[in-house]
Amino acid sequence: MRLVIARCSVDYTGRLNAHLPLATRLLVHKGDGSLLVHSDGGSYKPLNWMSPPCTLTVEEPDAESASAGVLEHWRVTHAKTGDALLVRIYEVLHDSTHELGIDPGLQKDGVEADLQRLLAEQVDVIGDGLQLVRREYPTAIGPVDLLLRDPAGGTIAVEVKRRGDIDGVEQLTRYLELLGRDPHLSPVTGVFAAQEIKPQAKVLATDRGIRCVTLDYEGMKGIESGAPRLF
Amino acid sequence: MRLVIARCSVDYTGRLNAHLPLATRLLVHKGDGSLLVHSDGGSYKPLNWMSPPCTLTVEEPDAESASAGVLEHWRVTHAKTGDALLVRIYEVLHDSTHELGIDPGLQKDGVEADLQRLLAEQVDVIGDGLQLVRREYPTAIGPVDLLLRDPAGGTIAVEVKRRGDIDGVEQLTRYLELLGRDPHLSPVTGVFAAQEIKPQAKVLATDRGIRCVTLDYEGMKGIESGAPRLF
DNA sequence: AAATCAATCTCGTAC
DNA sequence: GTACGAGGTTGATTT
């Protein structure tokens, strides 16, 4: 990994065109050839970048650039897509190279898959007397997250999201339409379950007779982990 | 901006929990307090990070950590959300600080807004004899990208996307349903226009009587820029 | 390899 | 400030 602090301007051509005027920035050239252009603010997204697989070539500036004070051209090209990044280096304030080795990678806990697994184990969060038929119940247009039986013999289709927005309601609506035609399942009702449900999604769901349930991941995880329940 | 190359492990607690085992990584501490943890590969996304506004405090390791070889604890906390990042530093291989100043920011060209503007000026791309009624035609459920009149007196609602997928078709369908009830506009047909239309979206659109148009941004831009037309 | 879907998404913008 | 949609989305999983 090579770290360079430089005064530079940057031009990107690819899925769109973009330009960065002359300023001092951090350039990170990774071992896989990729390049990141960072400013001293903003979030983790670079101002500009090139994703691997790509190659960086350092060129002498043409006469016009040289007379404007450019020391080097860094050209980063993505062979497959044709995307190209041109960094004009005006001044190098720092330049160092480091060996990092491969990274063991990130271990996560608390993503949508965890939510769905927990909810399948605790369907009473959705309502009393419900029984899990199965997770990822297959249909012609994709799997339904959870399929439940209610005590009256009806079916409940549950869509699980970490953040519930309008798209999730549309998705569940398509499932309900399809499942409702199956005489073995009918009548089918819908439940939209998420850690956070956006107002528009709630309105649309309610309008379509879909019940919304807000999930408490930490609480559900506490029950899973064997904390005593009082009853 | 401070750049540190260090052997470290990282733990994140917040919207989820995540852990990075001990390895050599780049730590970027930006002027706004944010921290990025990068490996020597992958794309522009860090392995772990904390977004501003947040604060970094350097602590002496506790006895247990110290005996395991930890030199310092870097604790980065987001006051508002309660998210926290703990970096255990085992060895510092590089440490430098740099003044970058504020960045003038990125100038883009070729995003959805540009597409819509160009298409509004070149409605003949969609069909002959069409006339633009207006861009961003307001409805109760949001603005329609383009509303056109066809020579027969009917209305065409156009949804413009850079990449056309199933969501865009659903959105246009909702508009068509609503607009079709207006006797001043009826009959209303739909056109789904995008630089790239996914197969599933094309199937759904066709099934609903919506015509798909693939847009050539560079070509349309060439016309806009004053290239001569032969007629 | 292509498609599908989630994300500590981030980022702009309109309300 | 919040909500909503786009993104050079990226990244993971499945077909």
Image (spheres, coloured by chain):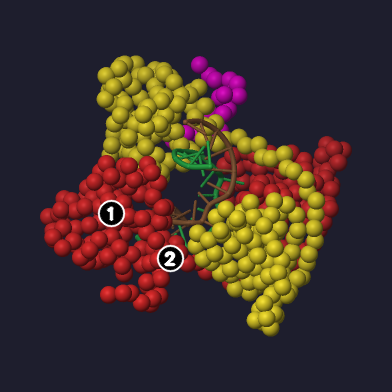
Chain colours: A yellow, B red, C green, D brown
Q: Relative to residue B215, is residue B169 depicted above or below? A: above
- A45 vs B59, left or right, is left
Residue type, label 2: Glu
| Circle 2 residue | B218
Disc 1 is placed on an element classified as strand
- Relative image position of residue A6 (x, y in whole percent): 72, 69
Q: Nearer the viewer, mark 1 or mark 2?
A: 2
Whether A216 is among the magenta residues is yes
Q: Which residue is found at the position 70% from the left and 63% from the top?
A: A57
Q: Please tell me in which quadrant of the rendered image residue A23 appears.
A: bottom right
Q: Nearer the viewer, residue C10 or A47?
A: A47
Residue at 57% across, 42% down: B15
| Residue B191, label in figure | 1
Which residue type does callout 1 highlight? Val
Q: State which chain disc 2 sits on.
A: B
Q: Quadrant of residue B19?
A: top right
Answer whether residue A187 is magenta in the image.
no
For label 1, the crowd category at 10 Å Cα-Cα, with few meaning under 14, some 14 to 19 and many 20 or more, is many
First to last magenta residue range: A213-231
Residue lying at 60% horizontally and 55% vertically, measured from the top left:
A79
Q: Is residue B37 visible?
A: no
Asked whether the beta carbons under mark 1 and mark 2 sit within 8 Å of each other, the answer is no
Residue A86 in percent (x, y) is at 62, 67
Q: CA distance from mark 1 to mark 2?
A: 20 Å
Residue B37 lies, in percent from the top left, at 69, 50
Name the quadrant of the N terminus of chain A.
bottom right
- Mark toward the start of the polypeptide (1 vs 2): 1
At x 73%, y 75%, the residue is: A71
Above or below, A125 relative to A48:
above
Q: Position of residue A75 (x, y in %)?
A: 65, 65
Q: Chain of mark 1?
A: B
